[in-house]
Structures are given as structure tokens and as C-alpha cells.
Image (cartoon, rainbow, N blue to C red):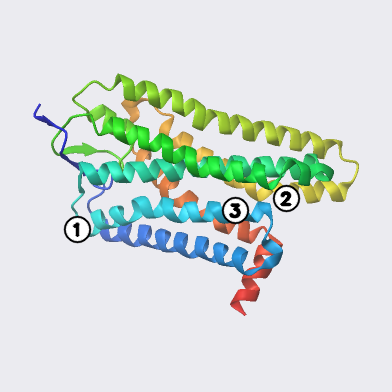
Amino acid sequence: MNCSKNTDFVLSGLSSDPDKPQLLFGLFLALYLLSLLGNSLLLLAIGADIHLHTLMYFFLSQLSLVDLCFTTTTAPKMLETLWTSNGLISFSECLAQLYFFTVFADMDNQLLTAMAIDCYAAICHPLHYALLMTPCRCALLLGGSWGVPHSISLVHALLLSQLSFDSNQEIPPFFCDFRPLLRLACSDTHLNEDLTMVLTGLLGISPLLCIISSYAHIFLAVAWSPSAHGKKKALATCSSHLSMVILFYSSVFATYLKSPSASHASGELGAAVMYALVTPTLNPFIYSLRNKDVKRSLKRIWS
């Protein structure tokens, strides 16, 4: 093959149904605009209402900001591909998209973990909440949620920039991702694959285990609570967050936990759309529709 470090790729994930580009363009444009609207309104509601200036809503506002950036990383290029019927993307553009896509995906994961820790402290140790969730610890959680993904993505991007690729190869999804790029590389990718495996354990499995542990303690505390009102209030506090966690990890598992031989299966595009576009769009509505304080703030803004 004619390998080069400066080549072009073709995003072929949306070419499986070339007869309906207008329909797909309208659908994905509506989802993208809905994501922008929902996350922007949630940010506005939290910022405008002083009663929502608490740690839980602060983390939620950070999650909405990250979801705004997450969808903007992939949706504009996807819409351009549908509109022009040209999925060509340069290596530098692909590397930049991959960097920011990985950053915001990891930040979603880290922020969901921080919110689970906050729920655990609020429900299991309400009398010691202020001692557990000190400003210093909250700053560490937030700083880690922003700093660690940027550092990890930078290392990935630098290593990928050293690989060689054949020109005009097709990338199955509608965005640049690690696994398709590593499969298309001409040069040795063992270091990239080993690093991906290690970091998947650190940034993927560890936060999930932390969330599972937090909710195990929460459910035990709720089960041992003698007050029915206390149980209802505790479940109402964490139900929206738990819904977001289930939605996020379901889309992650559907996208990445499949064998290489199934990489071109019909469900791959749907899983990728669910992960990159649908989940960030639904998150603000899950919290808004199930939270009286947020709905009250939105009504006040609307009036």
C-alpha cells in the first residue's frame, strides 16, 4: 500500500442508505438543534435561579456544557457529509475531531461519577455532607473531570499522529474513532492498542465500578430507612442521574463491545448515533422533566 502520514479518509457510515440523505439530514439536524436547545436551557435555568446554586446542579451544569461540546464535535461534519454527499476528511481534521470527541466522552463519564459520589454523600451521610463534599474535594473532582481527559486524549493524538495510513480509506462510523483508525494503519499499532486497553480500564471501568459501588450503598441505605417519605425522597434525588448513567453506558456498550467481525453490522450506525447524538440530547430533558426545581426555574424564565 502507498502509506503516508498525511492522508485523507472517507466517513462512510452514512453511505449505507444513499437514497434517503434528505430524510437523514432533517432527522439529525432536528436532533442536533434539540440538543443545543435543551442543554442551553438547562444551563440558563441553573445559572438564573439562585436556589439551584448547589453542588448537584453545578455538576449538572458542567454535564450540560460538555454535552453541548460533545454533539458539536461530530454533528456539523455529519450534516455536511449528508448535505454534500462527500464524506472526505483530512488526517488533521480527523485527529482534531478524535481528540475532542474522546475528551468530551471521557468528561461525561467523569462527571457522571462525580454526581454519583455527590448522591452517595447526600443520601448515605446527610449529616456529614458538608464535611465530605468540601470545596477542596469538589474542586479536585471537577479539575480531574477536565484535566485527566485532556491529558489522556493528548497522548492518544500524539501517538496516532506517528502512524501511517493508506490514502482514501473508509471509516465505518460518521466520526473518527480509535478502533477504525488503528485497523486502517499501515504501521505497528501495538503501543496504541496497549495504551488504549490500559486507559479503558482506568477511565472506563474504574468510574463504572465507582458508580455501582455508590448506588449499592445508596440502595442499602434506602432499604434500611424506616421512613417511607425518606425512601421516596432519596429515590427521587438520584433517579434522574441513574437514568442518565444507564442511558450513557448502554450506548457505550452497544457501540464498543462488539467483535471486529461485526463492525459493519446494520446496528453499528444506530449505536453510534445513540452514543454521539441521542444520549447528549436526552440528558437535559431527563433532568428537566423529572425535577420540580428545574421545571420551576424554566417556567420563571419563560414567563
Read off the residue under disc 2: 237
Point out the tag, 3 or 1, that comes first from the N-terminus.
3
Residue at x 60% of width, y 39% of height: 113
Task: Nearest to the eye among marks 3 and 1: give it.
Answer: 3
Q: Residue 170: x percent and y percent?
A: 20, 38
Q: What residue sits right under mark 1 in the picture?
A: 84
Of badges 1 and 2, nearer the viewer stands 2
Viewer-closest of 17 and 274: 274
Residue contact at pointers 2 and 3, CB within 8 angstroms: no
Q: Amino acid at mark 1?
A: Thr
Nearest-to-viewer mark from 2 and 3: 3
Which element type, helix, strand or loop, lies under badge 2?
helix
The residue sitting at 38% across, 39% down in the picture is 267
> Distance between the Cα atoms at labels 2 and 3?
13 Å
Kind of residue at badge 2: Thr
Q: Callout 1: few (<14), some (14-19), or many (20+) C-alpha neighbours within 10 Å?
A: few
Quarter-of-image position of residue 207: top right
The disc label shown at residue 60, or none: 3
Q: Is residue 159 above or below residue 114?
A: above
Looking at the picture, how far across and down is residue 218, in whole percent? 75, 38
Residue lying farthest to the right in this orientation: 226
Front position in the image: 105 or 152 = 152
Name the amino acid type tagged 3. Leu
Question: Residue 111, can we see it?
Answer: yes
